[in-house]
Every structure is written in C-alpha cells, then in structure tokens.
Amino acid sequence: MAARTSAVKTAPVTIVVGEEEFLIDRAVRDLIAASDAGDLHDLEGAALGAGELDLLTSPSLFGGGSVVVIRAAQNAAKEVAAELTRYAASPAPDVALIMTHAGGAKGKDLLAGVKAAGAQVIECPKVTRFAERLDFVRNEFRRAGQRADDAAARALLDAVGSDLRELAAACEQLAADGAGQVDADLVATYYRGRAEATGFTVADLAVEGHLARALEQLRWALATGVSPVLICSALAQGVRLLGRVGSAPRNLNAAALAAEVGAPPWKIDRVRHQLRGWPPSGVARALHAVAEADAQVKGETSSADYALERAVRRIVAARSGAADV
C-alpha cells in the first residue's frame, strides 16, 4: 500500500519509488526526522558491498537504534539486492531501512521482493502535467498550514515555473507571510515582473502575432534573469501545441484533447483561439524556427538573446505568411 509523502511514518523497511528527486529527498528526510535513531548510515546502492548490510543493521554499541539509507537501490549488485530482499522479510529490531528506487526495469526483482515482504511504499512519480503541478502547489500550502485559492496557485505556477524545489520554497515563503489565506494579489506582490515576463508569456504573444509586445516581454524576461533555454523551451511548447491541437479532430472536446496532449483544458481553449489566422504551412515554419533557435541557444551562437529575438520574429512572420526575417 502506498503512503503519502506528506504523512510519512517510520517503519522497519520503507522503499521510496519514483523519479521525482525533490519528493524523494523530502520523503527520506521526513522518515529520518520521524525516527528516534541515534546512528545514520547513508550510502548509494552501487557502493554497498556484499555482507555490508549485516554490519550496518547490527545493534549499536550505544543503543538508540539506527537508520540505514540506501539510495538508488536499483543499482545494487545482484547479491546485494538479494540480501536487501531477504532483510526486508525479516528486519532487525531498532533499525529503519530506507531505500530509494527509480521504479524502472532495472532492479525490478528487488522492488517486487521488497514490496512482497510488506515494506512501506512511498510513491514519488514524476510530476509532468499542469494539473499535477497545480495539485502540488495546493498540497504545499496545506502542508504549511495555509490556504490558497485557485487563482493564487495558477499565478504562482506562471511566476515560478515547474521546478518543484522552487515552487515548494515559494509556497513556504508565501504561507509564512499570508494573513489567513494566500491570494493572487499576494503572489503578484512577490513576483510582479517575473510573472509578467515568463517564457510562456513571450510564447503566447508570439503565436498570437503581437510582435512588439512579444519582443518587449522577451527583453524584460532576459533582463530579469529568465534563462534563454527556458524561454526557448516555452516557444517550442507553444508552437508544438498549435500543431497538435490544429491537427486534432475538430469535434474533440477540450477535456479529451487535454488528456491526450498533456495540457489543461483551459490551455486547449486558448490554443484553439490562437490558431485563428494561422496558414496550414505556418506551424511547420514556426517549428523550424524554434528548432534552429534551440540549437543556437545551446551553443551554436554567441548571442542567445539575438537567437531568441529572431525566433520570435520568424514565428510572427510564419503566422502572417510573410517571408522569414
């Protein structure tokens, strides 16, 4: 049975499964903090030698129990994986064994064996969809004992982006300063400028054909420290969504299409609006423009700023059917 990362408890054996590094690290920290152990042993699965588990889980000379953390247990040698599986079936008293596992095919026998032995399982799957990040933000505010309305959560995602560590830190700060409830106005107070100049804002303006405003926001985003790589990624995502939504059956509703392309329904509605005025060949031209910009931003040019500005101009030109600049 999977346990929630927000309510972890110490167990004789716990395996934290998934690829979301921030959630995995926090789950391990919470488990260690929840134990009363005096000793902590923290090592990588690949570094654990045969027979070493017995030494790590032996009773402490000073009492008080111990915590043994095995990170990336899927990388453990075959004989070590077998030892971990046997141990999970009969754990030592006063010892908490915590393993992390990526959840893939590598080390799958270890994962299956530890689960079958009755270990506590904490799932930390990759957070990729907008709706999942929105849930994460809501949960972070609840974790901090604060309420936040939906507008505040969306505003924070627009301002901070998708990095969970940054989102968690932002939620903690806002929760500490919020008087009863965090709202969009409080988010704007902290992140004004950054929220208005993200790569997604630049992308939206570009695909809608607003050249002057797109360039203004691009320059402001770069001046305020937004990474050129992130801006280029937003441009690519915006153009790819145009292509995917534009090629989808017209009778497909927003919710069904959102599930298919991995975007929220409100975004699908916006992209459908943005598609008005685009010629059939325009999206292909725009995709070519952002692909070139991506290569240039990642090292093929000495000026990422110029590469992004040219990409924005080419996207707008592709929408209008004008020649490339």
Image (cartoon, grey):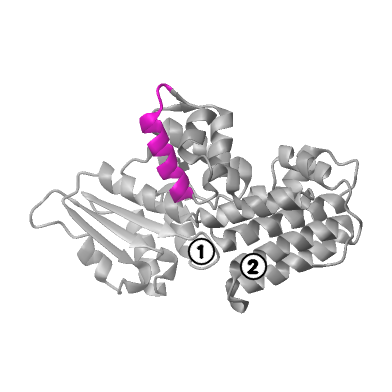
User: Toward which corner of the image does residue 190 lie, by quadrant?
Assistant: top left
For disc 2, the neighbor class at 10 Å (few under 14, some 14 to 19, many from 20) is: some
**Residue labelled with disc 1:** 108
Magenta extent: 164-180
Helix, strand or loop at disc 2?
helix
Of residues 228 and 13, the one nearer the viewer is 228
> What is the count of numbered marks?
2
Of residues 107 and 176, the one nearer the viewer is 176
**Residue labelled with disc 2:** 306
Question: Percent from the top left, x then y, of residue 173?
Answer: 38, 37
Q: Residue at x 72, y 48 (%)?
A: 205
Q: Are marks 2 and 1 in contact (CB under 8 Å)?
A: no
Q: Residue at x 71, y 71 (%)?
A: 292
Of residues 84 and 26, the one nearer the viewer is 26
Q: Is residue 184 left or right of residue 181?
A: right
Hey, what amino acid is under mark 1? Lys
